[in-house]
Image: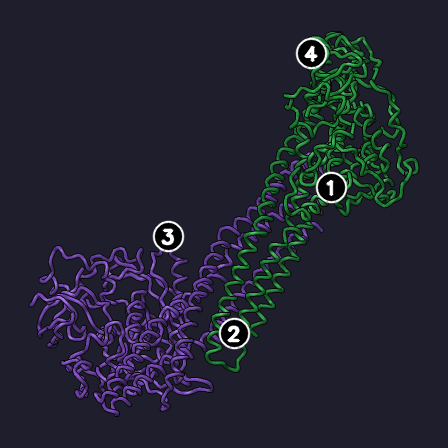
Chain colours: A green, B purple
Amino acid sequence: MASYVRALYEFSGEPGTSEISISVGDVLQVTRTDVGEGWWEGKNKNTGSVGLFPAAYVEVMSAVEAKHHQQPHVSQSVSDSHHNTGRYDSTADDYNDGDDWEDDWDDDNDTYSEIGPSNSINSKITDKPFPHSGSNYDNRHLPATPNEDNSLPATLSGNNTSTLKKSSMFGKSSDSFILGLGNKDKLPDNELVKIVPNDTYYQWQTNEGHSYSVIVASPKKESKFKGMKTFIAYQLTPSFNNISVSRRYKHFDWLHERLVDKFCLIPIPPLPDKQISGRYEEQFVEHRRVQLQEFVDWVCRHPVLSKCEVWYHFLTCTDEKVWKLGKRKAERDTYVGITYCWAISPPEKQLLQSFVDSQMDSCSHFIHMMDVSVRNLLAISNDMAKKCQSQSKKEFQRIGDGFSDLSKSLAIDERRVPSGNKSLADSVSKVGDIFCTIGQHFGDQPKLDWIPFSDRLHIYRGILNSFPDILSTHKGAMQKRKECERLAAEQKMSNSQMVDVNRRTDIVSYAVMAEMTHFRNEREIHLKQTLKSLIEEQIKFYTDIVSKLQDAYAQFN
Amino acid sequence: MASYVRALYEFSGEPGTSEISISVGDVLQVTRTDVGEGWWEGKNKNTGSVGLFPAAYVEVMSAVEAKHHQQPHVSQSVSDSHHNTGRYDSTADDYNDGDDWEDDWDDDNDTYSEIGPSNSINSKITDKPFPHSGSNYDNRHLPATPNEDNSLPATLSGNNTSTLKKSSMFGKSSDSFILGLGNKDKLPDNELVKIVPNDTYYQWQTNEGHSYSVIVASPKKESKFKGMKTFIAYQLTPSFNNISVSRRYKHFDWLHERLVDKFCLIPIPPLPDKQISGRYEEQFVEHRRVQLQEFVDWVCRHPVLSKCEVWYHFLTCTDEKVWKLGKRKAERDTYVGITYCWAISPPEKQLLQSFVDSQMDSCSHFIHMMDVSVRNLLAISNDMAKKCQSQSKKEFQRIGDGFSDLSKSLAIDERRVPSGNKSLADSVSKVGDIFCTIGQHFGDQPKLDWIPFSDRLHIYRGILNSFPDILSTHKGAMQKRKECERLAAEQKMSNSQMVDVNRRTDIVSYAVMAEMTHFRNEREIHLKQTLKSLIEEQIKFYTDIVSKLQDAYAQFN
């Protein structure tokens, strides 16, 4: 189903680009929302032009309103509907939600009516002991009205500095930031993040004393519309307030999209794969809970992600109206993508080009190699889990059944001529039972070793997947700096401008290096713990097998 | 290559049967030697008639002699040549022995020239501490000249009581024995075997104080004809004289045939399967040694088999000429098949028909069920061995390689920014090595658990395979007794004859029951030990895995 938006502000598309112009009140049919950097693609129903426009300049129309603009044959955007976060009106959009329980991942555009304190404590947002205030989502006005330095040549800055630059945001190009364009509103202090040197390198300043954890617990089957619609809600309880909130997978999905949009230099851990729950829903739901816990843990451990506003909103908001407001604001956040770099405060020290180059080359090589090995281990882990659950289980049960059959045949002869000896048939029968039990243990074991291992590797694979884009964004920044150096050499750019360009390029480099440090720290603790857990569970498992085999052996003494 | 024999004695074939008549000096071309019960099939070159004749009435001609009788186009018997034990002349028969080493099972008709004391102690046969004397192979003259009671009706005894009855021997029919026909020469005492009652049943009288063991050791590659011909010879050392003899697989094969011929009521353990050794000859030869040891152990434990003459000859003969003599005599033994029952001395007590019937029904059911379950376990065991050797080995090595790759990628990042911490890459690398080692252990393990288990089950399968024939021979005896009962009721058989018939039928029943007791005792000790060994080896194996995993875990502390 296509969605429709109405232009709230005027926007002039840059000629020669794929931008289109919109006037206040224009209705647009949205065809893509995953363009990135705050841009959407659509068709202006008033002018007929098709192209990109800033998502922040429009508001999504209600389904009832939209129906007047809908063409009966339009269906191309259905497959993208789960990316469409722009439809806010609830009343008419729930008509296709009947299969929500079966398709937990389906983007049913419900009203988030389930949001609320699951433990009945309706905490006030202003009570929270968190560095954000609930109201600072309004600190910035939309749309942005940058006050740019127009002394840059037209070829670099474009001739319309009052609008967002599609060319600087599409594909996460870092140009706009490097050139000092885009949103430069004063950022609230709590949005600022610092990069500081450590013993050997650079790192995000950690939130000393503010670290916290969040428990994802008790997936519950909830319902609304008098039971017409059921869904699974997970209870999230942060350690800093101990107040649970109820969140569905689709809320996680929405949050994830926000984080990915906002932090183009920070890899966002992946959510569990979207999939149909199928018949084993209890196991599926519980497993998804574990996977969501992994996601939440990773975000909590990250010094930047763990204190960002949209995450906090997701963790704490218990009021439906406040949720909607926060949701809208987060979707209109302009400090997203490369623009977010304005929030980063790097060390004073200017970076050496050669140092940065060698660091990035090494990172790129490392990320590629680790990605390959993690994918390989994930495939191994999945294969091992499957193998234990089916093949090994069957093999040992086959051995057990084989002994049971042998026992039954021996019993025939023991009935023929009974003797006072201990029955061999009985002993063999017990050995058969023990092997069947071992088979059952093989089947149950992956839940304790390989599946949790796979869940962890899934996170690593997602993180590693994000790095190439990050490194490519960094590369773009470096190239832009080289262009500027040429301009400066040709006296087309002032020295002070060039100093700023270098400073901003360093911010991108520092951010990538800080992120590499964070990833290293994660591995030193988290990956190590992952491997330890895997091996520990296998030790327990094989120890248990030994003990069971000793029981079997004892049958013959 | 067909073999030729010359008639030593006159024999008149019974008209209307497949027997042929032979006169002293007639040359016969042998076409089958596996007819059973001392009968061979062949063509009388002098009369042209084709059919069965007693093998004991002929002597095998030398190859040189035989060549005069050989037709160039005769080739049908080549495939049967390994059954042909009748060619003793060595000089001309070795021309096709070149591939003997490759095809260890091939019946190259060599001269047994490798027979001799492998430990250089040329012991005299007469020195041996065994209840047999080396010369008593000559105690009976051949052919048999039975002194039968001719008062039986012609329809039962046949009209030519001076010859062996093909009808009574072919297919192991017990008729001749039940009717008191066939060889009744005085048996030497050491050939007599007793069946005695035990606490609950009947058993073969055991050779108290005469039990012994034989070690099958050191398979050696030997050669003859100046290295033109090589073969594997196993060294057998009985505990009663500690003198090693050197035996090839073909000698075992010959022995096995003799035992099967002689003991139609005792299951003979099977030899290892005939197979090409292929490229892994060392492993193959060693494995065959273990399998031959299993065969030898089983025979040694059997109260009847372990004291029989041909077995003793096989175990002790170190002189080539004596070997040949013993071999010939064994092949001409007339106390074979059902005729061997003359050697059995049963308890006095007459058996109740109903008791025997229920025992045999139960045996038959048991043997069938145990056969099915042993075959099934053998398939499982073979599958498990294969699975460990290939799949499990590969799986764990794949895990190990996966960790090694991960370690290599981690090392790249550790080189980028070295730190004082213990290298995670190093730890992961060691874990990878440990998993590879575990994989190697999986590959090696079947040699210690599943393969020995399979070897044991192979013996059981062979034993169980023999029982249906034994039970069928018993059934035949019971039917013959019923016929006799009818004859007695019709006054066509005297009461004293009927008493003898019952006595002889009981001998067959007692023999089967004694054999069932022996099989039970074997299981109580041998099968139990087999299962214990399997489980014990698995305990060791999994304990070892636990220990290796603990090493892996320690990498992270």
Amino acid on which the number 2 mark rests in the picture: Leu
| Residue that numbered label 4 is attached to | A48
Do tags 2 and 3 sit on the same chain? no
Residue drawn at the location 85% of the way across and 42% of the way down = A117
Q: Amino acid at mark 4?
A: Gly
Q: Which residue is mark 1?
A: A230
Is A437 left or right of A27, judged from the image as shown?
A: left
Q: CA distance from mark 4 to mark 2?
A: 88 Å
- Tell me the mark number nearer the camera, choosing from 4 and 1: 1
Q: Is residue B198 above or below residue A487?
A: below
Q: Is residue B75 above or below residue A245?
A: below
Q: Which residue is mark 3?
A: B279
Label 2 sits on a secondary structure element that is helix
Whether residues under marks 4 and 1 lie with C-beta atoms below 8 angstroms apart, the answer is no
Dots 4, 2 in contact, CB < 8 A: no
Select label 1 or label 3 by which is in front: 1
What percent of the width, then of the height, locates residue B240? 38, 80
Say which residue label 2 marks.
A424
Q: Nearer the viewer, residue A272 or A513?
A: A272
